[in-house]
Image (cartoon, rainbow, N blue to C red):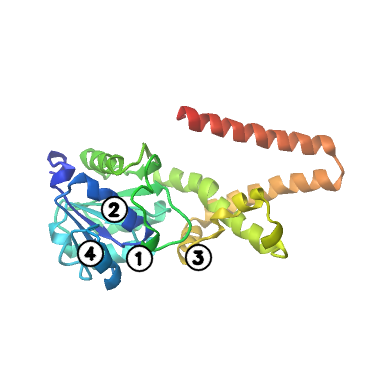
Amino acid sequence: MFNHLEIANCNITIVGLGLIGGSMAMALQGLNCANVWAVDINENVLHDAEKSKIISKGYLDPGIPLPKSDIVIMCLYPDLTVKFIKDNICKFRTGTIITDTAGIKSKLINEITAIVGNDLDFIGGHPMAGREGSGYAQAAENMFKGASYIITPTPKNREENILAVEKLVRAIGFKEVVRLDPQVHDQIIAYTSHLPHIIASALINCNQNHTRLIAAGSFKDATRVAIINSKLWSELILSNRINILRQIDGFINSLADFRNAIANNDAQSLITQLEQGRKGKEALMRDEKTGN
């Protein structure tokens, strides 16, 4: 069983050597794993990673590393993650731990759980770290340092395997590891991640006249995440659309309160709403400092 193995003795395969997968591979190099293999459709990326000694070996054919892998980390879009596991289900070694890094969990976990049976253990994961842009060229060894990692286990998962994933992500730099129910994860992420990305894009889209020359720091901060992987994020958003629609409706209501105060020249209402926002942000900052 995997709980008797140390990370240094493990064969780990990363599927998808993009921003997250590449950063995972870089971070794993300091752990003295037996092997860190990668599967990707881009032969040039695999060659570059091998040449830089970021991976032990790269493969176009997943049938070569999967039968020898103790842990497989899926770093693909959600739909491609499901397709890859379905297409290669017979190639995984019995007892392999499979985890993923997608930003949506309930739908993904339900679909994969129906595929893997009892011989494999799929444990959902979500690194709360990233950067603007996408692809292997944007990967960074220290991208996960001090970040949080969410694990979304189900009753089917074995506790020793959940602990193994926790140990692994802590070893590559994640500070806080949180367990969440997959549905709770999707509800929270709809507000804390999906909605801000939508707002940033909407803010850019609503008026692009002259912003290049006179955009202030607040505008730049508010629109930073508009530099987005559109294909990935459209898939994430549509997969979590019910939760996101609720959050959009709540944001529209909050924005309408501001609009009404401004339209009615109601200074007291405007002050109240701005104060509420300030106090809420200060509370978040205190929680970040204390680790709550």
- For residue 11, which numbered disc appears in the image? none
> Around disc 2, counting alpha carbons within 10 Å, would you say few (fewer than 14), some (14 to 19), or many (20 or more)?
many
In the displayed orientation, state which residue is furthest to the top: 290
- Pointers 3 and 1 in contact (C-beta within 8 Å): no
Residue 238: percent from the left, percent from the top?
A: 50, 61
**In this figure, which residue is indicated by the disc labeled 2?**
26
Marks 1, 4: nearer the viewer: 4
The residue to which callout 3 is attached is 230
At 21% from the left edge and 45% from the top edge, which residue is drawn?
Answer: 31
What is the C-alpha distance between the residues marked 4 and 3?
A: 30 Å
Of the two numbered discs 3 and 1 on the same chain, state the one appearing first in sequence: 1
Q: Which residue is mark 4?
A: 51
Q: Mark 4: which amino acid?
A: Lys
Q: In this view of the protein, which residue sits in the foreground, 183 or 276? A: 276
Secondary structure beneath label 4 = helix
Q: Is residue 67 visible?
A: yes
Distance of label 1 from label 2 (alpha carbons): 23 Å
Label 1 or label 4, whichever comes before in sequence order: 4
Q: Residue at horizontal 40%, vertical 46%?
A: 182
Quarter-of-image position of residue 201 = bottom right
Q: Is residue 30 above or below residue 199?
A: above
Residue appearing at x 25%, y 60% in the figure: 52
Of the two numbered discs 1 and 2 on the same chain, state the one appearing first in sequence: 2
